[in-house]
Amino acid sequence: MPRSYVHEARRRVGPKRARIVPIIERLAADHPDAKIALHYRNELELLVSVMLSAQTTDVNVNRVTERLFEKYKRPEDYLAVPPEELERDIYATGFYRQKARALRATMAMLLEEFDGRVPRRLDDLTRLPGVARKTANVVAAELGDPQGIVVDTHVRRLSQRLGLTRQEDPVKIERDLQRLVPREYWGLFPHLLIWHGRRVCIARAPRCEDCVVNDLCPSSRV
Ligand code: SF4
């Protein structure tokens, strides 16, 4: 897209600070069901589900955890079986050896340092083996205490298209969003972008004509 056209589009929609709350409110009204797609009943199941969701779909994880969580209910349960057995039980999520190793090491740390509970603080969560910042952000937000903003492929694409960031790196995108998005929306905001990205602002063919924020978006094709 020519630079002059981008500049004109940004000018037309106005500054991002003025657009962010209307964008959130309209997306929230359009996607009232936007929430985490992983199935879990407690904090440990949440942590395990998010760890297993790397490089696979949420649907696939839910299929695996339906049986997994009947067998593994406490951190001790993941350590009580031979590693190969846990690998078999999570095989269908892919990268099963790395994931099994990370799960066992995480369970050991939960027992040693956190009384078998899942910590709430991002700094503690990111110390758990195999728990990167994105995983930690998802867990903290679901536990009701978001301390950052989850940046996945949808959040990255939509933030760029909506002119909320010019960055490419997820850490820098998150920093831009933290400066812009009011804190009370840090948990909800990524879900809104993820659901909007799946349903409307699709990667290859955004449906701008059906988009409720097309008058606030510098990338709108309408
Ligand atoms: S107007 Fe188009 S590019 Fe912008 S958010 Fe909506 S669907 Fe995506």
Image (tube, helix red, strand yellow):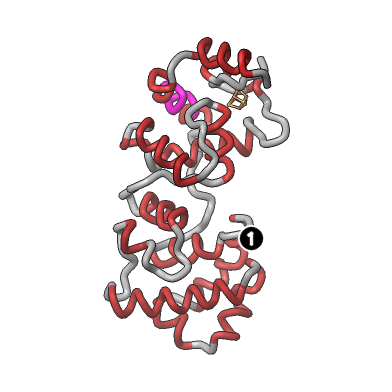
- Which region shows up in magenta? 22-27
Q: Residue 140 in the image: x percent, y percent?
A: 36, 54
Instruction: Indicate yes or no whether the magenta region holds residue 77.
Output: no
In this view of the protein, which residue sits in the foreground, 146 or 89? 146
Judge left or right: residue 43 versus residue 130: left
Q: Quadrant of residue 178?
A: top left
Judge left or right: residue 56 versus residue 100: right
In this view of the protein, which residue sits in the foreground, 98 or 207? 98
Q: Point out the quarter of the image occupied by ligand 1.
A: top right
Q: Tell me which residue sits at (55%, 85%) in the image.
A: 83
Residue 104 visible somewhere in the drawing: yes
Quadrant in the picture for the N terminus: top right
Instruction: Indicate yes or no whether the magenta region holds residue 26.
Output: yes
Q: Tell me which residue sits at (38%, 62%) in the image.
A: 126
How would you rate the neighbour count of disc 1 (Cα within 10 Å): few for under 14, some for 14-19, many for 20 or more? some
Quadrant in the picture for the C terminus: top right
For label 1, the residue is: 60
Q: Amino acid at mark 1?
A: Asn
Seen in the picture, residue 46 relative to 80 is either above or below; the reply is above
Q: Tell me which residue sits at (40%, 82%) in the image.
A: 76
Residue lying at the far right in this picture: please name it: 205
Q: Tell me which residue sits at (57%, 41%) in the image.
A: 154
In this view of the protein, which residue sits in the foreground, 160 or 106? 160
Secondary structure beneath label 1: helix
Seen in the picture, residue 200 relative to 72 is either above or below; the reply is above
Q: Residue 77 in the image: x percent, y percent?
A: 44, 82
Q: Residue 19 in the image: x percent, y percent?
A: 43, 20
In this view of the protein, which residue sits in the foreground, 15 or 5? 5
Q: Residue 217 in the image: x percent, y percent?
A: 55, 20
